Image (cartoon, grey):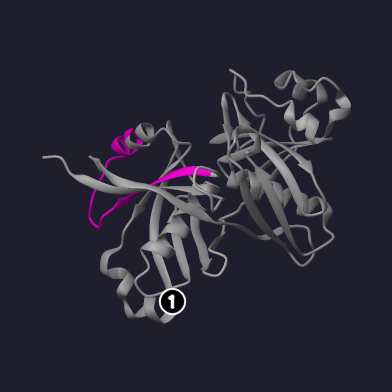
Amino acid sequence: MSKHLEFVTLDVFTDTPYQGNPLAIVLVPPQHEISDTILQIIAREFNLSETVFLYLNGDENNTQEAHKSKALEWSMRIFMTDRELPFAGHPTIGAAFYALTQLNNINATKARLHCPAGIIEADFDAASRTAKASIPQNVHLHTGHRYTTEEIRAMQPGLTDDAQLKAFDVFSPVAGMSFLNVELSSLDALAAIATTPVKPALKLDDGWDHGFGATLFYVKNGDDQVKTRMISGSLEDPATGAASCGLGAMLALKDKSSEITTLKITQGVEIGRRSNIGVVTTLSKDREGVQKVELFGTAVEVMKGTLRV
């Protein structure tokens, strides 16, 4: 006999339906076991960039400790159509937003989300309807291979002039998620970026050569604002929270002018799904390392229903 699970879809990093980055959240009841194979099949059926499986805790959320701390706890797993991810940004913000607005039976403002990359501390501001999450960061700047302008232009033939390329670094916000961050000189150069049938393999340092990799192109628009596009082969993502966290941390480490920096990121405009992403990076006292990276944004519910398992 088949069973059914409830699901919702949200558009994340926007308060406008059909903008931002779509996300499916499947609610898994307590003591309900689902194999990894079935989880992957469900994610492939949604055919979105990511699907979150949010494991409900039943009466655990009503314990005296939860009431005292006003913090709720959930576990989650994040799947692309072909693999599980240790962490991803827009699924985390979407899950935190949904959990604290729809599954919150004690009027809590804080939550802890357990995922394979670690424990994510999240909170929700009702006035702005914004969720913020402190990501389980393990930042790393890859130095084993320095990309050249020729290599970047081979990936993106639309970039016809070396002057369009200002800087390029490979940076990981967490193990298993790595991005080639390419700074471009202008919005015209950013408009020349295109998807490609072949996904270039990133050249990573020893011990880091695993997980998901992509290229993030960005143009600075003031001290605290950038516009970005994320390309992974034939995929262009409307909003990439993990890449945004990495970019915010990388730029903060390069600049070192402030212990706490906020970066406001606009992504997805070129594909008709504008996303507004925020990243707060806190450096160590000597400003040589990253102490905390927080991702923030809002979301809006679009669909809900049930699925068979």
Foreground pick, 79 / 16 = 16
Q: Give the range drawn in magenta.
A: 21-41
Q: Quadrant of residue 239?
A: top right
Foreground pick, 283 / 30 = 30
Image-based side of 56 in relation to 121, left or right:
left
Q: Where is residue 165 in the image (x, y as percent from the top left)?
A: 83, 31
Q: Position of residue 125 (x, y in %)?
A: 54, 68
Name the residue: 81% across, 50% down: 254
**Secondary structure under the numbered disc 1 in the rendered image:** loop
Foreground pick, 29 / 278 = 278
Q: Can residue 174 be seen in this view?
A: no
Image-based side of 201 in relation to 7, left or right:
right
Q: In which quarter of the image is residue 269?
A: top right
Q: Quadrant of the C terminus?
A: top left
Q: What residue type is labelled 1?
A: Lys
Give the answer, above or below, for where 136 lies relative to 237: below
Q: Where is residue 216 in the image (x, y as percent from the top left)?
A: 68, 36
Give the answer, above or below, for where 278 lies relative to 49: below
Residue 222 lies in magenta, yes or no? no
The residue pinned by badge 1 equals: 70
Q: Is residue 189 visible?
A: yes
Foreground pick, 148 / 196 = 196
Q: Residues within 10 Å of mark 1 (few under 14, many from 20)?
A: some
Q: Quadrant of the N terminus?
A: top left
Name the residue: 52% across, 66% down: 123
Q: How many marks?
A: 1
Q: Position of residue 65 (x, y in %)?
A: 37, 78
Image-based side of 289 in relation to 65, left or right:
right
Q: Residue furthest left?
A: 1
Name the residue: 31% across, 74% down: 62
